[in-house]
Amino acid sequence: MPPPPAKSTAQQTSLFDDALNPAPAAPLAESHEPRPAVSAGGYSAKDIEVLEGLEPVRTRPGMYIGGTDERALHHLFAEVLDNSMDEAVAGHARVISVRLDADGMLTVTDDGRGIPVDPHPKHPGKSALEVIMTVLHSGGKFSGKAYETSGGLHGVGVSVVNALSERVEVTAWKDGFEWRQAFTRGKPIGGIEKLGATRKHGTAIAFTPDPVIFGENVAFKPARLYRMARSKAYLFGGVEIRWSCDPSRIHDQTPAEATFRFPNGLADFLAERIKDIETVTPEPFAGRWSRPGETGKVEWAIAWTPAGFGEADGFMQSYCNTVPTPEGGTHEAGLRAALTRGLKAYAELTGEKRGGLITADDVLAQAGALVSVFVANPEFQGQTKERLSSSDAQRLVETALRDPFDHWLTAQPKIASALLEFVVERAEERLKRRRDKEVARASATRKLRLPGKLADCSAGAIDGAEIFLVEGDSAGGSAKQARDRKTQAILPLRGKILNVASATLDKLGQNKELSDLMLALGVQGGSKFKEEELRYERVVIMTDADVDGAHIASLLITFFYRTMPEMIRSGRLYLALPPLYRLSHGGKSMYARDDAHRNELLETEFKGKKPEISRFKGLGEMMPAQLKETTMDPSKRTLARVTLPRSEEQVETLVEDLMGRKPESRFRFIQENAEFAVADLDV
């Protein structure tokens, strides 16, 4: 492998990532159940289905809107409203109307340019309107010519709404005429109709969700639609949104009619959110930023309160091109970084030495923060756009907030000092909680009966402490010599542990290896697991860099997932990445993590030379200095963090298929993913 990096890095890896590695399929070897017979016939070209038009959306709606529940239903409204907001942000629409009728039909109308109705050049016999409504990945937002920024870049939003609606009626006021076309479940009902002449311009989309998809009892909630419409109005001060709802559908305090227009944008939004709440500063830190001739724009509003915000100490809401991003992303990271650096710089300027204690969590622990960005070609994670991943957004927000925040602090020293003192107090409280936890851990350690094979670390604090789970006494001996005794503990395990996914509870309770492991960690499994009792900040699985090692790692990951998934969710479980080869020539030595990496080094670092290549049979064969240099030294190593995908159901299905009691599931998985496997032959 190339020389290790100067700093420790943690790669994010998921249980899904490991699924395509051949190693997890190894449990087949330990099963004694007969494999199912494989039929040579019964599967041919006629069995391959090709879904046409919008059928993929109706077949798998979860891929496009995240499910078929109430949240997904209201996502349809968000997609249509986003299109109208894009017209407003682009400067072509001023008023947007949202109306919910007695029969449940929802209509969104804007006074923008109107959906194009002229014939589409690549779809003979179809208007542009019909193409937009019936063809995935069609729209005017890809090239950037029609919209400088937009929230609907995937080109699937309104066509997905059409696919999942029982009926859709689209009206376009365009080119001096009114045009209309109706659809049902994604298919047009006749062609586009040219109605009377008009001086209006804009678009109206009326739709009724399909009960076949969402169920008979799932319907739009007026209160939720009202809040969504109002939130959009806060995000762009140049738009007016008019809300109306048939009174028969309202069963709470939601008004039947309302008009939203907020010239001060997020500042108005925050003022509404924090009214009657005591704040640290008289006025929030709010502003807007843009550069002439550039597309990037940022708006923000932040307030701090000692009392908290209702049930939460603080909150952060972020948006990109008026689209909510509930899972945050790079724009939120930029806000956190800018505020933290600004307060630290002000502390240094005023001689407040405690400013060095401040972290981003301290700055935003009891803050209400809103941030909205407008960027060209944003990158989201998933079609539902819940997390922004554009790296440019972080730099944009940091640049936008840096100077305004510095000026805001220096222009009002009393207010700035009060805010700094408030944040420093949060930092000191955090450090006190950590010290209390360290004392509790030290006391617990003295009382614990630790397993005899455990070589514990000497540190009394949890922070920075880590335990390495290694296979076998031989590897354990090398690891003990290579470790930092202050912060690194070593627990050797005997070969392959019990597969908890296929074992009974009795076997689990009687297994000594797993009992020793739980004892060393200081926790209990299942409902009795308490993260605060964990004796280490990180748990690192360190196995040989071969198939057997990957199998042992899979068994351990399965154990932690089944007995203490909270530890994985909190990011405490890691995989060490030891090398498989050492290449030496002259005075130059390098390590390769696998065959592909070895071949790469031969072609680059050792091109035209014949280096000596040694293959490590296991960690026990590595010299302690080599193990430390490549795998255990925090300043040089690379760790892979084990994470869980968002869907718990998918994770459970994967674990059951690969590690459960049915070998036929593993056999089927191997057949379906054989093309991804790489042979590991030790000749």
Image (cartoon, helix red, strand yellow):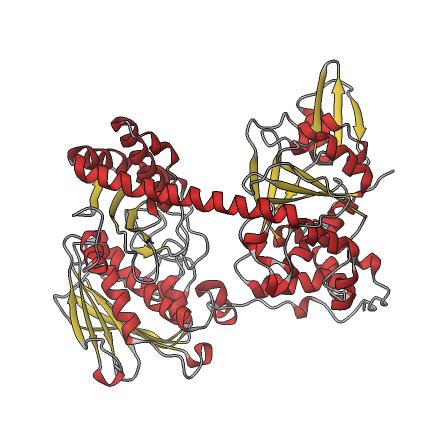
Outermost residue on the top side: it is: 586
Q: Residue 437 in the image: x percent, y percent? A: 51, 47
Q: What residue appears at the point 71 percent right and 30 percent down from the top-left corner?
A: 482
Q: Residue 165 in the image: x percent, y percent? A: 39, 75
Q: Residue 617 in the image: x percent, y percent? A: 82, 36
In the rendered view, tell whether residue 87 sits above or below residue 660: above
Please tell me in which quadrant of the rendered image residue 222 appears: bottom left
Residue 662 visible in the current orientation: yes
470 relative to 322 in the view: left or right: right
Residue 599 visible in the current orientation: no
In the rendered view, tell whether residue 43 sits above or below residue 143: below
370 relative to 275 in the view: left or right: right
Quadrant where the C terminus sits is: top right
Asked whether 288 or 434 is in front, the reply is 434
Q: Residue 265 in the image: x percent, y percent? A: 19, 53
Q: What residue appears at the point 21 percent right and 83 percent down from the top-left corner?
A: 247
Asked whether 142 or 682 is in front, the reply is 682
163 relative to 91 in the view: left or right: right
Q: What residue appears at the point 81 percent right and 40 percent down from the top-left corner?
A: 473
Asked whether 329 or 667 is in front, the reply is 329
Asked whether 34 or 527 is in front, the reply is 527
Please tell me in which quadrant of the rendered image residue 546 appears: top right
166 relative to 678 in the view: left or right: left
Q: What residue appears at the point 80 percent right and 59 percent down from the top-left corner?
A: 28
Quadrant where the N terminus sits is: top right
Please tell me in which quadrant of the rendered image residue 65 appears: bottom left
Q: How many marks?
A: 0
